[in-house]
Amino acid sequence: MLTIAVLRASAVPAVCLAFSIGAIAAEGEAAASARQWSAHDRSLARSGGEVLDEGEREIEPAFAYESSRGDDAYRRREWSVALRAGLPGATQIELVLPYARESFDGETIKGTGDVQLELAKQFDTPENAPELIGSIALRRSGRTGQGHDSIDAALTAVKSLETVDVVASLGYSFGRSRATLGSLSVHWDATPTVAMRAGVAGTRRALVGELGVSISLSERLILDVTAGRGLTREAPDYTFGVSLPFRF
C-alpha cells in the first residue's frame, strides 16, 4: 500500500491556496499552446466520465464540507490536493492528498483523510456505443478517513445524446466494510463556458443528490462547485464542494 507522510494542519490550506495562485500565474504564459479545455469536459471528469490525454497533467486544490443535524450532529471540513497525469493507452493516474477536521458529539478530530492512488483506463468501444472507463483505487486510511484501508473498483459508462451526456457508474469497495458504490448524472451546457450537472451518488444506505456547475475561467483553469442534499438516513444532510482544477 501507499504510505504518505502526515501533513500538518496549517500546511494543507496554504498548499491549496498556493497551487491556485500558481495556476493562475502560469496560465498567462502557456495559454497559447494549450488544448482547449471546456467546462463540459470538466463536468464529465468530475463524475469519472473522462480521462486526461497522454502528456496532459492536472492539479486540483479543493475544499469540501458536509454536515448532519439532529441527535447525531456532525460536521466535516476537508482540504485536498489532487494530482493527475495522462498516460499512454488512454490511461490516467491520480493521487489525492486530503486533510480534514471533523466535529461530532462535542469532540473535534483533525488529521489526514484517506490518501488515494487511482488508475483509470478508457476502453475502445464500437461507434454509437457508450464510452467505458474502468478504474481501480487504493485507499490508505487516515485519522479522519473511513477507518480502514480498501481497494475500490468501478466501471463508468458515458452516453452522448442530442443535448446532454449521461454518466453512470457502478463499483465495489473491498475492505473491512464492503459496499456497492454507484452514481448517475446528467450533464449539459448552459452557455459555451458554463456546464451544469445533476445526479445522485453514494451507496444504498448513504445516497446524496447533487447539483454542480463548472465554469471556464480560461483555456486551462476551471471553477467547479457542487452542492448536495442527503436522500437517505445515513447520508449527510448537506454537502458542498469547490475546486480550481488547472491543466498543463
Image: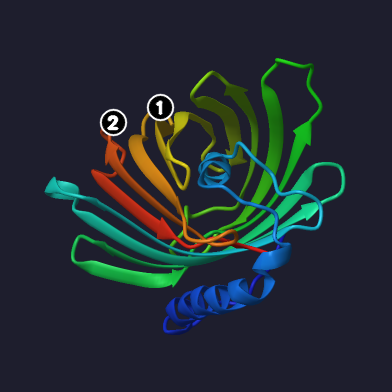
Q: Quadrant of the C terminus?
A: bottom right
**Position above or below: 37 against 113:** above
Q: Is any atom of residue 94 visible in this view?
A: yes
Tell me which amino acid carries mark 2.
Answer: Thr
Count of marks, rendered view: 2
Query: In terms of sequence position, does the residue under pointer 2 or pointer 1 come before the other?
Result: 1
Q: CA distance from mark 2 to mark 1?
A: 8 Å
Q: State the residue in front, 136 or 5.
A: 136
- Callout 1 amino acid: Arg
Q: Quadrant of residue 117?
A: bottom right
Residue at image coords 31%, 42%:
228
Q: Nearer the viewer, residue 236 or 27?
A: 27
Residue at point 38%, 72% (across, down):
110
Q: Is residue 196 left or right of residue 240?
A: right
- State the image coordinates of residue 129 (x, y, percent, origin top left): 70, 16
Where is residue 236? Give x, y as percent.
28, 44
Residue located 51% across and 47% down the image = 39
Tag 2 secondary structure: loop
Tell me the colour scheme of the image. rainbow
Give the side of residue 80 with respect to residue 37, left or right.
left
- Judge whether 200 appears above or below 19 on screen: above
Q: Percent x, y for residue 67?
A: 25, 53
Would residue 152 be found to the left or right of residue 24 on screen? right
Q: Nearer the viewer, residue 215 or 76?
A: 215
The residue to which callout 2 is attached is: 232
Label 2 environment density (alpha carbons within 10 Å; few <14, some 14–19, many ≥20): some
